[in-house]
Amino acid sequence: MILQATPSEVSLDEVKSKLLDLSEIMKFHDLHVWSLDGNYNVMSVHVRLKQDYKLSEVSDLKEKIRYRLHEESIEHVTIEIGGKDGGCSYGKSKI
């Protein structure tokens, strides 16, 4: 049996603060942090931006997020980006 849990060395309050400290981010949800082996920590998050950005700017923002979260012992981050008017489509897909 494999159990997943939030790693003890990761402060969710610090992670949330680092995300909201970025001027481009309006809010976020579906934040999940876990580790399968106790060493390699991963995270996924859906970020909503304050305005729409060019693809190259979004790419730069993702790198900035990954760099900040690496400081919190998170090795891999999957980031879904939503624009200022875009809502989350999770659970709404008809596919």
Image (cartoon, grey):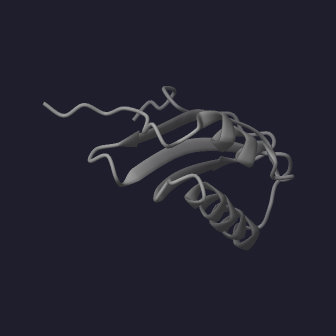
Residue 62 or residue 1, whichever sits in front? 1
At horizontal 48% and vertical 26% (from top left) the residue drawn is 91
- Give the position of the C terminus as an image quadrant: top left
Residue that sits furthest to the front in the current view: 9
Which residue is depicted at the point 81% across and 48% down? 21
Q: Which residue ends up furthest to the top in the rendered image?
A: 91
> Looking at the picture, does residue 61 appear above or below residue 3?
below
Q: Position of residue 85 (x, y in %)?
A: 80, 39
Q: Position of residue 38 (x, y in %)?
A: 31, 46
How many numbered marks, from 0 up?
0
Across and down, in percent, residue 78 comes to 50, 53
Where is residue 40 shown, x and y percent of the image?
36, 55
Based on the displayed image, in which of its 4 quarters is residue 84 positioned? top right
Q: Quadrant of the N terminus?
A: top left
State the residue at coordinates (70%, 70%).
Answer: 60
Foreground: 78 or 91? 78
